[in-house]
Image (cartoon, coloured by chain):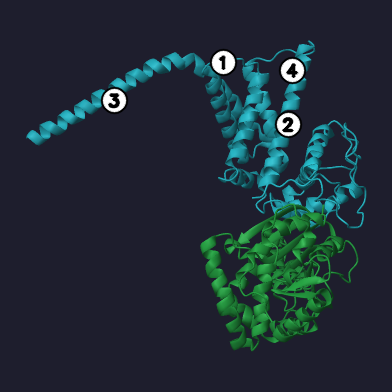
Chain colours: A cyan, B green
Amino acid sequence: RCQHCPPLRALQASAVLRRVSDEHKKEPLTSSSQQQFDSHPAGHQPERDPQGPRPSYTGQGGQESEDYESEEQLQRRILTAALEFVPEHGWTAEAIAEGAKTLGLSVAAAGMFHSDGSELILHFVSECNTKLSELLEQEQKLVQLGKAEKKPTDKFLRDAVEARLRMLIPYIEKWPQALSVLLLPRNIPSSLSLLTSMIDDIWHYAGDQSTDFNWYTRRAVLTGIYNTSELVMLQDSSPDFEDTWRFLENRVADAMNMSNTASQVQSTGEAVVQGLMGAAVTVSNAETSRAVR
Amino acid sequence: VRLCRCPCRALLSRPPGAPRSLRGFAAGPEMHFGFQTVTEAERRKKIYQVFESVAKKYDVMNDSMTLGIHRLWKDILVHKMNPSPGTTLLDVAGGTGDIAFRFINYVRSVREQQLQRKLKHHQNLSWQEIFDSYQEDKFNSLGDSQVVVCDINREMLKVGKQKAQQLGYSEGLSWVLGNAEELPFDDDKFDVYTIAFGIRNVTRIDLALQEAYRVLKPGGRFLCLEFSHVSNPLLSRLYDLYSFQVIPVLGEVIAGDWKSYQYLVESIRRFPPQEELKEMIEDAGFFKVDYENLNFGIVAIHSGFKL
């Protein structure tokens, strides 16, 4: 696949439709547009008629008009608009087409994305993770300012996972479809990295500063808790998903107990292994004695 | 009156920085018609004559030359388009209507699926209500989708209209005589613009691309299905052999027209390769331009969006 990057030009549609107002996001765009302009000196002086505000690559700081928007930003806007149609159409190209329509674009714009809706789902997951991070950060600020109590670890984990799972509630009917798409081999790298970064975030705000093997154990445990709670939520019909939160509470309690019983598990493990060895010896003795007879 | 029988690959491999006018068909009065050099006006006339003479046997020749594979290529194009009901399609150089008919079939089946899904949600309706819903949807089997077939050649359009009548396509279909370099349509009108095996015959490709950009709605998609360049050396040698030895002979035997099919294979060799066409499409203002090779580059689908 060709990775040729065209110089960032003003997208006519977005110029007509909306003005992107966050300036600070533009700074990295500015510098990259400067580089690309330098590497394509002569080839882009087209003799076509003007099609609206032309980007001006003047100035070191980059005086860009506010109508400037990159393809990625437009794609993200389309996907965000498409989320509203997911409960009706599912995570499909149809939902993306409806989303594009609300932005004033043609339905053919949905052709920019995969027809199985992968990008829509990944976009949604990453948006949820961002929201969760913001939530946790706000809570942490409150604690630092002394306006709130620091929660014990198990309550913190429970609340964080519950907050994250609650974001699925509007889309819960079509979520099984989304999960199956996230498990497609093509999507596994992205979905896995989103999952691990979310778990990382939660442990970070929970105050985990371990640098030994515990780091891996903690993340594996929380991933297990999150995934199983998610699955329970999919088939939960209790009011306000009470059963799910209770399940979550129990799993977190188990995890807390696990560290206490870790040493017990080791000795039990040794005992079990010895038992198995003894059983194997007994069985082989029985075999040989039968053979001899 | 042919200058050179062998594929002039030397002409096609140039330093990338060279301006396009050296290409020999963009600017200036000297243009290529297959491997001949002609003026712009002559080229248009010759191409018109080619298609006038092959119009009646166009579909038969397509099948025999490509062993029927062209049907798969066109199917893949429409699948890639994935049109939803309510889409307006402009099929340029669409002469005998292949893409238009496939579009209508696709949209119809998507619409049926949509209606079925709607019914599933309404399973508590009475049978009277279900029957009533059939009545209203009967007149909307295409979901307001439309396709306009535009071609510069009257004969090709005639053949296309006859085919439509025979196959029973009537609603949502329009036939317009027009030149791809100067379309008789207003700005921002179509959701999708396709040109299947036609852009090779356009005299000023850059003008056609600009017109495509003009008539598309914001967010609209440009799709181009065309013969392109095979990079695999072994395959390209076999392909050349087949093109120059077999196809004109088929043309003579089936359609009684050697010269037109000689023009066809020569024009394929003269057409810009995938990357260059991609750049031309980007120059016209399209974004997210990409191409997909079919059959190792014998055919390529280029796609771009007006954003």
Nearer mark to the viewer, of 1 and 4: 1
Q: Dot 3 lies on which element?
A: helix
Q: Nearer the viewer, mark 3 or mark 1?
A: 1
Tell me the amino acid under the disc marked 3.
Answer: Leu
Q: CA distance from mark 3 to mark 1?
A: 35 Å
* Kind of residue indicated by mark 2: Thr
Measured from the top left, where is residue A97 in percent x and y?
A: 76, 54
Residue ID for mark 4: A140
Nearest the eye: A132 or B135? A132
Name the amino acid type tagged 4: Gln
Q: Residues within 10 Å of mark 4 (few under 14, many from 20)?
A: some
State which quadrant residue A176 falls in: top right
Mark 4 and mark 2 lie on one chain; the one further toward the N terminus is 2
Mark number displayed over residue A276 = 3
Give the Cα distance between marks 2 and 3: 49 Å
Please report, as a chain letter, where disc 4 is located: A
Looking at the rendered structure, the kind of residue marked 1 is: Thr
Question: Is A100 drawn above or below residue B267 in the view shown?
Answer: above
